[in-house]
Each structure stands twice: as C-alpha cells, then as structure tokens.
Amino acid sequence: MEPLDPGLRDALKRAHPTLTDHDIDRYEELLARRAALDPATDREEIERLDRERAEMAKRLMPHYAEVSQAFAAQRRRPERQRPNVRTTIKRPEP
C-alpha cells in the first residue's frame, strides 16, 4: 500500500482547510489495516474500518472524490513539451 502522493495531500488540504496531515495519516492507516485483512475471516473488522473511513471522509474530506479525480486527470495529462528548435548564427564574412 503506497502513501498518498504529496501533491494529492496538498490538494486535499487546499480543498478542506481544516484537514491536517494527522487526519490524512489516520485515513491512510485505516486503508492499510483494511488491506491487510482477509475478507473471508475478517468481515466484521473490515466493515468497522469502512464505516470509520466513510465517517471520517464525510466529516473531514467531503470533496475527496472530486479532488482525487482532478488530481489523477492532471497527472495523466502530458506535459507540454517545448519544441526542439535549433538556432544557427552565421557570422558575416569579412
């Protein structure tokens, strides 16, 4: 499980001014714990973690999905490349 991209963290904090790094760290911790569980044997714990994450997202990051989608779209957009222009300066002959 990879941590959130620093750019996404910043975008989330801009969209949610009261959101802190601690809040984001807790959200990521819940995701990591959920990913480590076995759905066949840990269904109740998975449901509990999902409820806690959903409540946290609703309370602290209501625009998470929109921000995350916009960030992903921006990352997929190819950067504009400068054209490869070569300039040759000819010196006048004496």
Image (tube, rainbow, N blue to C red):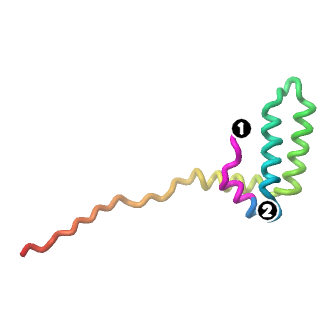
> What residue lies at 65% left-to-right and 51% top-to-bottom?
72
Q: Which of the pair 20/58 is nearer the observer?
A: 20
As drawn, which residue projects farthest toward the top?
A: 40
Q: Quadrant of residue 37?
A: top right
The answer to whether residue 21 is above or below residue 2 is below
Q: Position of residue 79 (x, y in %)?
A: 51, 56
- The kind of residue tagged 1 is Met
Would you say 46 lies left or right of 13 here?
A: right
Q: Which residues are magenta?
A: 1-12
Instruction: Name the image quarter holding the C terminus.
Output: bottom left
- The kind of residue tagged 2 is His
Q: Circle 2 sits on which residue? A: 16
> What residue lies at 82% left-to-right and 53% top-to-bottom?
23
Q: Position of residue 19 (x, y in %)?
A: 81, 59
Cβ–Cβ under 8 Å for marks 1 and 2: no
Which mark sits nearer the N-terminus, 1 or 2?
1
The answer to whether residue 18 is above or below residue 65 is below
Return the mark for residue 1.
1
Q: Quadrant of residue 49?
A: top right
Q: Which of the pair 73/51 is nearer the observer?
A: 51
Q: Secondary structure at mark 1?
A: loop
Q: Residue 90 lies in magenta, yes or no?
A: no
